[in-house]
């Protein structure tokens, strides 16, 4: 079957290699992570949307990141949870479903970078140009920046997946827990797959370069401004805010880089599978916690709501 073109649209997923004894513990663990991630992100969106005191550009950008995390987690974990409880021979999906999953997965990864780049710019304006912050970071500007982050990501990923869909298929097995672009074009035996490799590598390098470059330049300027100031209180607040953003960025960047890098080395397939799953559960689960705990306004509102709920229960 590997040597002939597959005529049907059914693909088999290799999935995670878990023993029958460990399948239920792994299922419960991932289910708890999924519920926790969804609860935190949805809760953060509701809190920011309903509280007028949180209707600021920075908080709206948190919502942008949470929406992306919800999409990225939901397109992977529910399907992965189903496959864990299935026999390996029953882990299959249609080609259309696989393409859709790969498309959303890559949009999630790209928007993760572009959203954090916008948030870094927001912090730069707030710290380096505080008097002009309200003039620069208006609601209109936030909408434009968010639309750009999603629009550029959709365009880049559409080209990426479009190049893959055009290929004929001679294989039917996805050697991954879920579908992504690399797994899809590995189904083809055509020589023209080199174009997909080149575009995928080029787009990845461009995204990583712009992402790292913008973070490095932005926070370099912030550090320079903080060093020139003599107000330790403001400097400590700025450093605390920026360190939170950098921590989230490093977690996201490292997990994404490991996933992309290991795709080039088939002998490390199990490590790649773990890294790819971690990329879809660790940053989405940590983002609302990190920003929620480190942002004073959100932390105070959360504490007030919790106290109010306790009083109502009593």
Image: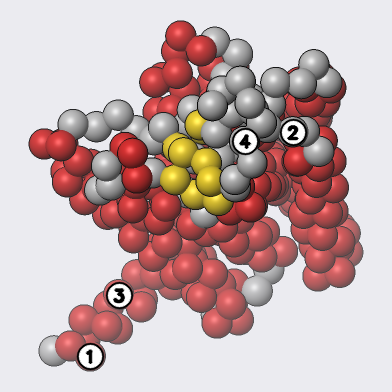
Residue nearest the viewer, comparing 26 with 177: 177
Instruction: Please name the residue that numbered disc 1 is placed on.
Output: 312
Q: Residue drawn 40% across and 28% down?
A: 274
Labels 2 and 1: the sequence-earlier one: 2
Q: CB of mark 4 within 8 Å of CB of mark 1?
A: no
How far apart are labels 3 and 4 at the CA level?
Answer: 56 Å
Q: Position of residue 54 (x, y in %)?
A: 59, 72
Q: Position of residue 107 (x, y in %)?
A: 69, 47
Q: Is residue 105 left or right of residue 224?
A: left
Q: Is residue 88 left or right of residue 67?
A: left
**Number of marks drawn:** 4
166 or 270: nearer the viewer:
166
* Above or below, comparing residue 116 to residue 168 in the picture: below
Q: Secondary structure at mark 3?
A: helix
Q: Which residue is mark 3?
A: 306
> Which residue lies under the disc numbered 2?
168
Secondary structure found at label 4? loop
Q: CA distance from mark 2 to mark 4?
A: 9 Å
Q: CA distance from mark 4 to mark 1?
A: 61 Å
Give the label, 2 or 1, closer to the camera. 2
Q: Specify which label sits upstream in the sequence, 3 or 4.
A: 4
| Disc with the residue nearer the chain's start (3 vs 1) | 3
Dot 1: few (<14), some (14–19), or many (≥20) neighbours within 10 Å?
A: few
In which quarter of the view is residue 143 placed? bottom right
Pointer 2 or 3: first along the chain: 2
Looking at the image, do the residues carrying marks 3 and 4 touch, with CB atoms under 8 Å apart? no
Q: Is residue 291 above or below residue 180?
A: below
Q: Using the rendered image of the protein, determine whether residue 313 is visible from the camera's viewpoint.
A: yes
- Dots 3 and 1: beta carbons under 8 Å? no
User: Where residue 6 is drawn, which disc sits there?
Assistant: 4
């Amino acid at each position: 079957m590997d040597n002939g073109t597959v005529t049907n649209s059914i693909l088999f997923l290799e999935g995670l290699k878990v023993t029958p004894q460990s399948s239920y513990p792994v299922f419960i663990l991932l289910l708890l992570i999924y519920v926790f991630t969804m609860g935190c992100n949805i809760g953060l969106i509701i809190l920011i949307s309903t509280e007028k005191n949180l209707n600021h550009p920075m908080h709206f950008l948190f919502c942008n990141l949470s929406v992306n995390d919800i999409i990225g987690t939901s397109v992977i974990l529910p399907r992965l949870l189903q496959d864990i409880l299935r026999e390996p021979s029953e882990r299959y999906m249609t080609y259309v479903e696989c393409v859709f999953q790969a498309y959303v997965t890559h949009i999630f990864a790209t928007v993760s970078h572009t959203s954090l780049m916008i948030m870094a710019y927001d912090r730069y304006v707030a710290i380096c140009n505080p008097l002009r912050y309200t003039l620069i970071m208006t609601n209109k500007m936030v909408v434009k920046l968010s639309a750009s982050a999603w629009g550029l990501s959709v365009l880049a990923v559409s080209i990426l997946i479009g190049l893959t869909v055009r290929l004929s298929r001679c294989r039917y097995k996805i050697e991954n827990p879920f579908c992504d672009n690399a797994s899809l074009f590995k189904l083809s035996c055509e020589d023209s797959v080199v174009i997909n490799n080149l575009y995928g590598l080029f787009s990845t390098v461009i995204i990583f370069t712009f992402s790292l470059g913008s973070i490095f330049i932005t926070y370099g300027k912030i550090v320079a401004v903080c060093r020139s100031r003599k107000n330790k209180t403001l400097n400590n607040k700025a450093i605390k805010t920026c360190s939170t953003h950098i921590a989230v960025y490093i977690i996201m960047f490292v997990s994404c880089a490991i996933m992309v890098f290991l795709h080039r080395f088939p002998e490390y397939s199990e490590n790649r599978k773990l890294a790819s799953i971690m990329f879809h559960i660790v940053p989405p689960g940590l983002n609302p916690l990190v920003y929620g705990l480190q942002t004073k306004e959100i932390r105070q509102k959360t504490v007030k709501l919790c106290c109010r709920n306790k009083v109502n229960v009593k």
